[in-house]
Amino acid sequence: MKTLNRNTIKTNRYPERIIQFGEGNFLRAFVDWIIYNMNQKANFNSSVVVVQPLEKGMINVLNEQDGLYHVNLQGLENGKAVDNIQLIDVISRGINPYTQYNEYIKLAENPETRFIISNTTEAGITFDPQCKLEDIPAKSYPGKLTQLLYHRFKTFNGAPDKGFIIFPCELIFNNGHELKKCIEQYIELWNLGHEFKKWFDTACSIYCTLVDRIVPGYPKDSINEILEHIQLEDKLVVKGEIFHLWVIEAPQSVSKEFPADKAGLNVLFVPSEKPYHDRKVTLLNGPHTVLSPIGYLSGLNTVKECCESPVIGRYVKKVMYDELLQTLDLPQEELIQFADAVMERFRNPFVKHFVTSIMLNSFPKFKTRDLPGLKKYLERKGELPSGLVLGLAGIIVYYKGGKRGNDEIIPNDDPAIIELLSKLWAENNMENLAKGVLGATFIWEEDLNLIPGLSKKLCGYLQMIQDKGMEETVKSIL
């Protein structure tokens, strides 16, 4: 079987017009797939330089394959089964700024580069006051981006036509506004000057976006069949559902530069992405975040298994229909229709979405996806939503680590969060554990112990999980 690279496969080469922060499964199966289709169908004529946002990542593997990889999309489209495999050729190269800082900063010198796209998880768009302009590179994503923008400004002497169009894809509301706020804080902290601030405000545009495609990632269950089909060694195969939606809060003029609609793609340029954001984050990502630890600790491995389980399936429906759906203001009929479609996507027979892949950064995810619904439910119903509180308990128990059968549980989150959970679990006191997690203001930006009854309810679930196991605890709230 041949090695996948540009020597063994003849592929197109395009001008490097896009810088992408993030090399993970989602961006490759969503954004880069969209750019591939734009090149094929709308003469977009653009390639992507990928920047690794964290010190440890997959850039080396990506470069070994010359940026090439396959996307396997599966699902139902207009009632018909779809199962296709495409070779994506839009990534020109990858850069690790921690070891190739000069190569990274030189990206600002390419006059053809026009777009910056990112997905650095919910934890990525944060202002870290410890970052310095002289850092090689700045630790935070907004810090790295400010370094790049400032070098761009100096290289082209503040030319107004050398700004960037920036699409953050991190799943936080107003991601564009939040990213811009962080950059403005760095401009002030680093004393980069009024002229640079003016160029950033007038020449660069950062737009809020919402992304939607379920991407389970590397298809370890079917990889042998895929490799047999493509007859190439590909370490970066990524599986996704056929459904896709990208909502961009930007004027229609932006679509002329980024002509996704001409490629027949479900990319919408709208005056406000808020209605789409609230609906999607609450009814798709919200259930995802809590079903994952609950399902995994009940012995299940995929989203589909969770939804089809007699017990956990009822839990998922309770969280979605009885709790989260009740917190939204759109018409009930529309919300139920969307929730039904989400449940169908969760049960996609083609896609094995492993719950462990959803568990990355679970605390920031719960904060953005489920905590607003928990508060709104309490406000509207006068009681706490038991499914969401149990979901938080599930995350806490998952972060205890240890083993599930023969499988080792390895939580993946901010080291400070991992350290806090380790210390709290070492005390083996459920009341202190609940209060310690809820009181971690560096996670929540507030003290959740102030929410009436939450620490007591959370403590009760933690104790019950320890005494009776996860499935029995779930049964108690159904």
Image: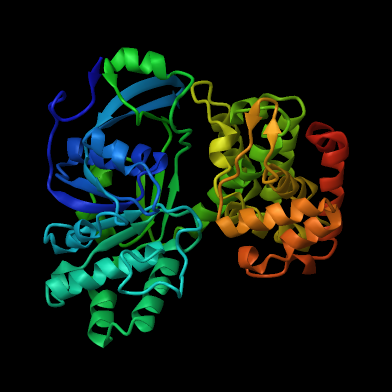
Please give the name of the residue rendered at 80% of the width and 54% of the height, measured from the top-left corner: 427
Task: Examine the rendered structure and indicate whether residue 228 appears above or below residue 178.
Answer: above
Would you say 476 lies left or right of 137 here?
Answer: right
The location of residue 256, given as percent across then percent down, is 21, 54
Please give the name of the residue rendered at 75% of the width and 56% of the height, measured from the top-left corner: 424
Query: In which quarter of the view is residue 192 placed?
Result: bottom left
Question: How many callouts does the rendering have?
Answer: 0
Asked whether residue 478 is in view, the answer is no
Please give the name of the residue rendered at 25% of the width and 54% of the height, measured from the top-left corner: 19
For the C terminus, the quadrant is top right
The location of residue 137, given as percent across then percent down, is 32, 64
Front residue of 318/336: it is 318
The location of residue 465, given as percent across then percent down, is 82, 40
Task: Examine the rendered structure and indicate whether residue 207 appears above or below residue 247.
Answer: below
Query: In which quarter of the view is residue 305 placed?
Result: top right
Front residue of 388/426: it is 426
For the N terminus, the quadrant is top left
Please give the name of the residue rendered at 31% of the width and 43% of the height, measured from the top-left corner: 59
Asked whether residue 406 is in view, the answer is yes
Would you say 266 lies left or right of 303 here?
Answer: left
Most distant residue in the bottom direction: 194
| Snapshot colouring | rainbow
The location of residue 223, given as percent across then percent down, is 41, 20
